[in-house]
Amino acid sequence: MDRIEIEIKLNTDRAWMLERLGAMSTEELNAPRTFSEHDPESRWSYADHFVHTTLIERNWNAMFRRHVSGEQGLEPRRRDDGTPQSMDEIMASIHSWTEEWKAEQSGKSFVELVRVGQEVRADTIALLAELSDDDLLSTIPGAPWADGTVGGIMAANADHGRMHFAWAKEDPVAGRQSDHDQHDGDHDHA
């Protein structure tokens, strides 16, 4: 994707998300919708899924900056003894990290969550303007998102928001109350 396509996608999908969430009542926005991947007692709302995407976007911006400055973009995940973590260990730490962020944002109004997201999105757009076309096309070694390029991953922020909206819309929490055979959510929040 080129920089124009990336900016269009980021802006179009953010507007799409804000229109849908902004039309919800406070009760609907904050009602429990999905099961936490970290804490069996925690439930995620539309608002929680929305602010989660802000955390990931902020983290990806830091990864892009490390990568284009010549550092390792995707930080290796290692155990205390230096050996690589298993995928289960990596996902457990990511789920813990995102659950902490959810708890930090809990109780904030939708307007405040949007403000936090605007700050990060403004940083994303500013970063997009700073990056060269070659930077956008460069591949981050080991990055599992999109096509692995800076530009592709940056554009994936839009897809990430829609994915989380779809998970919240499925509402397995309500489904579990009426269908005890339904399995716990096996969606990946990272």
Image (cartoon, grey):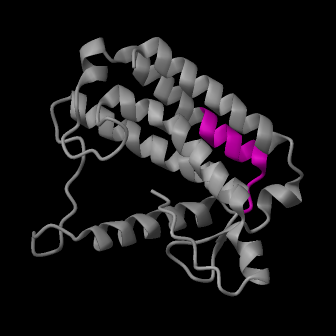
Q: Where does residue 14 sit, x and y in percent of width and height?
A: 64, 32
Lateral position of residue 106 relative to residue 129, left or right: right
Q: How many marks?
A: 0
70 versus 26 height, above or below: above
Residue extending furthest toward the bottom: 180
Quadrant (top left/top right/bottom left/bottom right) for the N terminus: top left
37 versus 140 height, above or below: below
Lateral position of residue 37 relative to residue 77, left or right: right
Quadrant (top left/top right/bottom left/bottom right) for the C terminus: bottom left
- Majority secondary structure of magenta residues: helix
Task: Choose top left, top right, bottom left or bottom right for residue 129.
Answer: top left
112 and 30: which one is in front? 30
Residue drawn at 10 percent across, 70 percent down: 83
Lateral position of residue 93 relative to residue 111, left or right: left
Q: Where does residue 87 sit, x and y in percent of width and height?
A: 27, 67
Q: Where does residue 85 sit, x and y in percent of width and height?
A: 20, 69
33 and 175: which one is in front? 175
Residue drawn at 58 percent across, 34 percent down: 119
Residue drawn at 31 percent across, 73 percent down: 88
Q: Where does residue 12 sit, x and y in percent of width and height?
A: 64, 24
80 and 19: which one is in front? 19
Membership of 165 in magenta stretch: no
166 and 139: which one is in front? 166
Residue extending furthest toward the left: 82
Residue drawn at 47 percent across, 62 percent down: 188
Membership of 108 in magenta stretch: yes
Task: Choose top left, top right, bottom left or bottom right for residue 30.
Answer: bottom right
| Residue segment shown in magenta | 107-118
